[in-house]
Image (cartoon, rainbow, N blue to C red):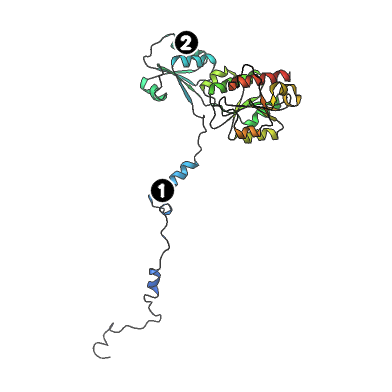
Amino acid sequence: MAGNSQRKGSVRKQSKKPTAGSGGRVRRGLEGRGPTPKAKDRPYHKAHKQQQLAQKKAARPRKAKGDDAEWVAGRNSVVELLREGVPVTGIYVAEGADRDGRLREAFSLAADGGISLLEVSKGELDRMTGGAVHQGLAAKIPPYEYAHPDDLLTRADELGEEPLVVALDSVTDPRNLGAVVRSAGGFGAHGVVVPERRAAGMTAAAWKTSAGAAARTPVARTVNLVRQLKAYQEAGCTVVGLAADGDLSLPELAADDDYAKGGLVVVVGSEGNGLSRLVAETCDRLVSIPMAGGLESLNAGVAASVALYAIAEARR
């Protein structure tokens, strides 16, 4: 070869395997990698990290409504709690609070009941009670331990009695709940069932109204009241709902041994709206309470008391 053809490197030597051009090795580098992943699917993207954090929070067990401790503020309120025997885990008094008769009575009742008495600053008491008017005194009530609805049937079986259960539908006033619990304890019912949502729970007001009956009569909560009523029916109980337009009167119910002396669930609705449609449709019978003077309805607590009294008399 002419020129510098003999110089080393001047002529490319043919390799055993041909070198790939843009249609070979380079082509693979030019190939697309598919659609761009969403931000939440990219491990190092902020959206992905936020999604992972949200999933972790959702996996944590959440406290059900009513499972938090409750604070009762004010001297009169605290003294009334202690007089009624409501369970209290601690009495908190503000530093420098005026020692009047109510405060001294609270101290005495707390000492008799073995309840801890703690002195804190006014600012700390403001924080613990959420800024309520506490007058230098507050009480902490522990979360109420609700029973399982099936426990009420077990309780009746252990006593050798036919089940008698009261279920509340959309009753939102805790004082009505307390009154029903008090009547249930007084007339031999084996417990009270309330829905978890849109219903009153066992607060301090309910405890006070029950006049101590809440310590002896279990209150159960259910996620779905209609489903629980059907479960009671499957267990052999008759479900009756109190309604002004019921097709059976309370005296007729009490006179019928199949109803009054068998397993029975009495459903009480709210004073304003009564029983909800699905609950009313689930009941085996709707029962009315005869009244004079044109009165259309009774307070939920009073209606439950009247019905339970009639049933208790029939069972005797």
Please give left or right for residue 30 compared with residue 112 in the image.
left
Residue 121 visible to the viewer: no
How many residues crowd around disc 1 within 10 Å: few (fewer than 14), some, or many (20 or more)?
some
Of mark 2 and mark 1, the one earlier in the sequence is: 1
**Relative to 40, residue 286 above or below:** above
In the picture, residue 314 is in which quadrant?
top right
Q: Distance between the residues labelled 2 and 1?
A: 56 Å
In the picture, residue 164 is in which quadrant?
top right
- Rendering coords of residue 110 (x, y %): 49, 15
Name the residue beneath numbered marker 1: 49
Q: Nearer the viewer, residue 17 or 235?
A: 235
Please give left or right for residue 237 compared with residue 120 in the image.
right
Q: Residue 105 carries which label?
A: 2
Q: Which of 24 and 220 is in front in this view?
A: 220
Q: Which residue is drawn at 69% across and 22% down?
A: 250
- Rendering coords of residue 290 (x, y %): 66, 20
Please give left or right for residue 29 compared with residue 146 in the image.
left
Q: In which quarter of the image is the C terminus?
A: top right
Q: Which residue is drawn at 44% across and 47% down?
A: 52
* Element type at mark 2: helix
**Relative to 196, residue 124 above or below:** above
- Rendering coords of residue 213 (x, y %): 60, 19
